[in-house]
Image: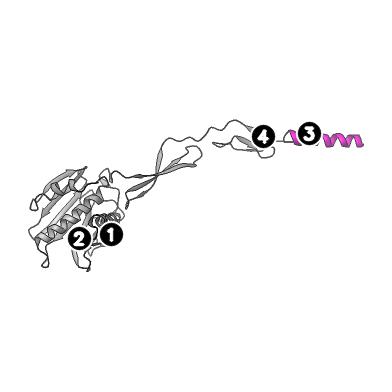
Amino acid sequence: MKKVLAILIALIMVLSLTGCCLKHEWTEATCTTPRTCIKCGKTEGEPTGHLNTEWMEESVNILKAKREMVLVCDDCGRELDDKTEDIESFIDGDEFLFTAKEFVERFQKCYDDLDGGELPLTFKYSINSYGSVNFDVYNRYDYWLAWGIFYDVNGKAIEGTNEDGRINCVAIFVPEQEEVGLEAAYYLLTWLGEAACMAVDPAVTDIDVYSEPIFSNKYADGEVSDLHGLSYTCGLSEDNEYSLYIEIPD
């Protein structure tokens, strides 16, 4: 009896050392780990390694004109790497990448960077009494100076019901006021126009490339300049209101 018991114990010990006593229970293989038995640790096959084909866009920072990119394994979905890159163009087909509100935020930042404290202005996003999305420009004393509006690809003003939609055209208007003459209004438009150019075109590094063709003639109503794939039109209406339209042409 003792001899039989000893043999059974020995068999059990051998089985415990050599593997599962009944049946393997496998975990699925991954890109870096082969199929493995959770009982005995035995493995089968080889890992294939991570498979990936291209970087994927994870998020876009309109304000800073940056794009967050991630490299993801096509097989297991694991994030392998990430990077931040500059956005070279906001043009996406016949629309800008940004919404009206995002443009106003970027417009403010670009103006602050350009101005350097010489002519501090505040840009306020709003939906006007007609339901159109627009923005107003105020000086340091909260005095209203100018305004802007946005259009879609059909030439219609962006409505508050669609304020998250992307835009095709930004229009800026600077009226002559009693406190400031036409020359002062044009001076203000120049500042706003340069900042707007920077806001719609992240590739701009030298604003001088825009100053001459856009504002070469302050009375050149309807004169169009095409730069960096965008159309810039500066005009002066009969009631002495300057306008600047920046759009993606057809």
* Residue 85 picture location, percent across and down: 36, 44
- Name which of mark 3 and mark 2 comes first in the sequence: 3
Out of 102 and 250, give the one closest to the viewer: 102
Q: Residue at x 9, y 63 (%)?
A: 181
- Name which of mark 2 and mark 4 comes first in the sequence: 4
Q: Residue at x 86, y 34 (%)?
A: 7
Tell me the residue that label 2 is attached to: 147
Would you place residue 178 above or below residue 54 in this image? Answer: below
Tell me the residue that label 4 is attached to: 42
Question: Please, what is the three-letter code of the amino acid marked with disc 3?
Answer: Val
Q: Are the residues flagged by discs 2 and 4 in contact, CB closer than 8 Å?
A: no
Q: CA distance from mark 1 to mark 4?
A: 63 Å
Q: Main secondary structure of the magenta part?
A: helix
Q: Report the span colored magenta.
A: 1-18
Question: Please, what is the three-letter code of the amino acid marked with disc 1?
Answer: Gly
Question: Please, what is the three-letter code of the amino acid marked with disc 4?
Answer: Lys
Q: CA distance from mark 1 to mark 2?
A: 16 Å
Q: Please, which residue is most extreme toward the top here?
A: 45
Q: CA distance from mark 3 to mark 2?
A: 87 Å
Mark 4 falls on what kind of element? loop
Tell me the residue that label 3 is attached to: 14
Tell me the residue that label 1 is attached to: 160
Q: Residue at x 34, y 48 (%)?
A: 66
Q: Is residue 163 left or right of residue 45?
A: left
- Name which of mark 1 and mark 2 comes first in the sequence: 2
* Residue 70 picture location, percent across and down: 42, 43
